[in-house]
Image: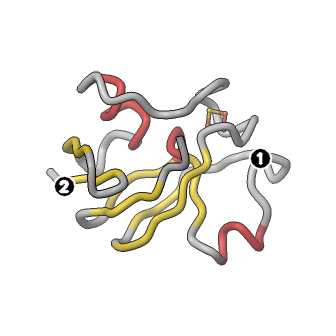
Amino acid sequence: MFTININNDQSFVCSEEETLFEAARSQMVKVPYACTRGGCGYCKVKVLEGQYKMDRYAKSALSDEEVNNRIVLLCKTRPLSDLHLEINQ
Ligand code: FES
């Protein structure tokens, strides 16, 4: 289990087997989402620290430039270490 910190304010735990979205929702942590399938981009957040991997998503949901800037889709991202996320609310 990894610890996922949001804005130095809230945190939840997440394993490599679940997405950040699934883990946050199951622990009642509010995060942005809409389609939950990597299609809309509504769940974009920035990863300030830590390693992760992303499952397949629609190119229209996340640009290559965003990927290079460590922007991820919560509904398609799994942690490989503890993470520090920035979410604009
Ligand atoms: S909720 Fe639509 S891409 Fe994640």
Q: Residue at x 66, y 77 (%)?
A: 68
Place of residue 7 in the rendered image (x, y in percent of width and height, measured from the top left): 36, 55
**Where 5 falls versus 66 (above or below)?**
above
Mark 2–mark 1 Cα distance, whole angstroms, equals 26 Å
Where, by quadrant of the figure, is residue 69 drawn? bottom right
Query: Quick check: is the Cβ at mark 1 less than 8 Å away from ligand 1?
Result: yes
Q: Secondary structure at mark 2?
A: strand
Horizontally, residue 14 falls left or right of residue 32, namely left
Task: Give the image quarter of residue 79.
Answer: bottom left
Local packing at callout 1 (Cα closer than 10 Å; few below 14, some 14-19, many 20+) is some
Q: Which residue is mark 1?
A: 61
On screen, residue 72 versus residue 27, left or right, reads right
Which residue was labeled with disc 2? 2
Position of 57 compared to 30: left or right? Answer: right
Instruction: Please tell me how many numbered marks the rendered image carries.
Output: 2
Q: Is residue 40 above or below residue 45?
A: above
**Ligand 1 visible in quadrant:** top right
Q: Secondary structure at mark 1?
A: loop
- Callout 2: CB less than 8 Å from ligand 1: no
